[in-house]
Image: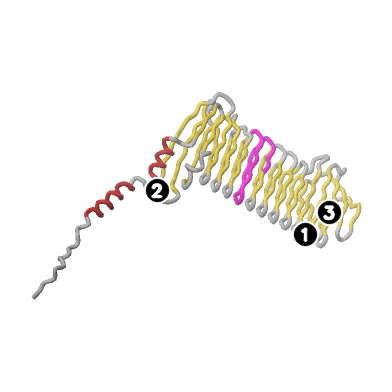
């Protein structure tokens, strides 16, 4: 029988391929990091006068507190948000070379956004009281206390809180809340859909929110507040007030000071005034389809179904209330 001249083929061993696989695994073991891997750093900088601090944080919280004079202490923690190539090296680089720049008494933190991509970052910063702060966060919270300021704080979707600030505060957030307590300078606060809670503010206040509520306690000077569909509540009111809402309610408790002017307006919400028995003011109220109810002694000057002109005491202050379809109640 004639045998075929075709040689018998045998499968060659795949050792080179296996070696390549193991080599690649060994090579990448230190390059690809799991989600949640973290590192941290601490750094102390020396300053010799008032500090100017700027912080940018894409995703994570920032906390600024008072520390000893003459130094700024920074503690940062970086955490991976996702699997990333060369993650281990990037974590080591951030630990050994944190994104901090100093020029005299000016300190910048986190300005190199490309290095910080894919990381959640927490900063805890202790500064001298004489510090001006500009802080911005994409999706984290910002908290500051016990420094002079001024403060400029902005968050995309995080909360902002500041207390015991000796100068002006500007705070803005897209969908977070704002809490301000004991601020000596003027305040400007705005939120897209968050609430504003403001207490013991010693200078003029401007507050605005799209669909959140505004609560103000013990305003010492002029207050201007606007909300789209939220409620506004003010307690211990004495100075000038100018507030309005489209579909929310207005509630004011206080005693208008002499020569002060309260201008209160809402489209479809209710207005409630709870005033001191010793309050002295001239009062004008108008509603298109609501009711006007009074439960305090007033000297009525003119009245019909939709309007009321009256006086309490000597009429030292002036209060005007206008609503389209809401009720007006004063007591």
Q: Position of residue 241 (x, y in %)?
A: 76, 45
Q: Earlier in the sequence, mark 3 or mark 2?
A: 2
User: Residue 326: which disc?
Assistant: 1
Corner quadrant of residue 287: bottom right
Disc 3 target residue? 285
Q: CA distance from mark 1 to mark 2?
A: 60 Å
User: Tag 3, which secondary structure?
Assistant: strand
Disc 2 target residue? 85
Residue pictured at 77% horizontal, 48% vertical: 275
Q: CA distance from mark 3 to mark 2?
A: 67 Å
Q: Between residues 18 and 143, which one lies in front from this camera angle?
A: 18
User: Residue 256: which disc?
Assistant: none
Q: Between residues 168 and 255, which one lies in front from this camera angle?
A: 168
Residue pictured at 16% horizontal, 67% vertical: 6
Q: Position of residue 106 (x, y in %)?
A: 56, 30
State the extent of the magenta-drawn residues as a range.
166-188
* Left or right of 22 in this view: 126: right
Q: Is residue 162 above or below residue 307?
A: above
Q: Residue furthest left?
A: 1
Q: Are there few (<14), some (14-19), or many (20+) residues within 10 Å of tag 1? A: many
Corner quadrant of residue 56: top right
Q: Position of residue 114 (x, y in %)?
A: 49, 43
- Based on the picture, tell me whether residue 199 belongs to the magenta stretch: no
User: Tag 2, which secondary structure?
Assistant: loop
Q: Are there few (<14), some (14-19), or many (20+) residues within 10 Å of tag 3? A: many
Q: Position of residue 222 (x, y in %)?
A: 75, 41
* Left or right of 40 in this view: 319: right
Q: Earlier in the sequence, mark 1 or mark 2?
A: 2
């Amino acid at each position: 029988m004639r045998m075929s001249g075709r040689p018998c083929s045998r499968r060659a061993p795949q050792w080179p391929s296996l070696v390549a696989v193991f080599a690649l695994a060994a090579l990448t073991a230190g390059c690809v990091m799991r989600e949640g891997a973290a590192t941290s750093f601490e750094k102390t900088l020396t300053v010799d006068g008032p500090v100017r601090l700027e912080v940018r944080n894409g995703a994570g919280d920032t906390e600024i507190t008072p520390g000893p004079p003459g130094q700024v202490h920074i503690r940062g923690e970086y955490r991976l948000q996702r699997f990333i190539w060369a993650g281990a090296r990037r974590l080591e680089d951030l630990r050994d070379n944190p994104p901090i720049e100093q020029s005299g008494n000016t300190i910048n933190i986190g300005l190199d956004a490309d290095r910080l991509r894919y990381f959640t970052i927490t900063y805890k910063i202790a500064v001298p009281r004489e510090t001006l702060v500009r802080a911005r966060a994409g999706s984290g919270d910002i908290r500051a206390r016990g420094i002079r300021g001024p403060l400029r704080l902005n968050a995309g979707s995080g909360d902002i809180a500041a207390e015991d600030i000796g100068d002006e505060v500007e705070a803005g957030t897209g969908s977070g809340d704002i809490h301000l307590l004991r601020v000596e300078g003027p305040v400007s606060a705005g939120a897209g859909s968050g609430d504003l809670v403001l207490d013991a503010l010693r200078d003029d206040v401007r507050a605005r929110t799209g669909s959140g509520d505004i609560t103000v306690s013990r305003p010492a000077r002029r207050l201007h507040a606007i909300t789209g569909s939220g409620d506004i509540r003010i307690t211990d009111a004495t100075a000038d007030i100018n507030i309005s809402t489209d579909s929310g309610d207005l509630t004011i408790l206080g005693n208008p000071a002499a020569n002060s002017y309260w201008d209160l307006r809402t489209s479809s919400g209710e207005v409630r005034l709870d005033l001191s028995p010793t309050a002295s003011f001239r009062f004008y109220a108008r509603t298109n389809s609501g009711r006007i109810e009074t439960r305090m002694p007033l000297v009525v000057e003119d009245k019909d179904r939709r309007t009321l002109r009256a006086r309490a005491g000597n009429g030292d202050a002036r209060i005007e209330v206008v609503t389209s379809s809401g009720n007006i109640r004063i007591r």
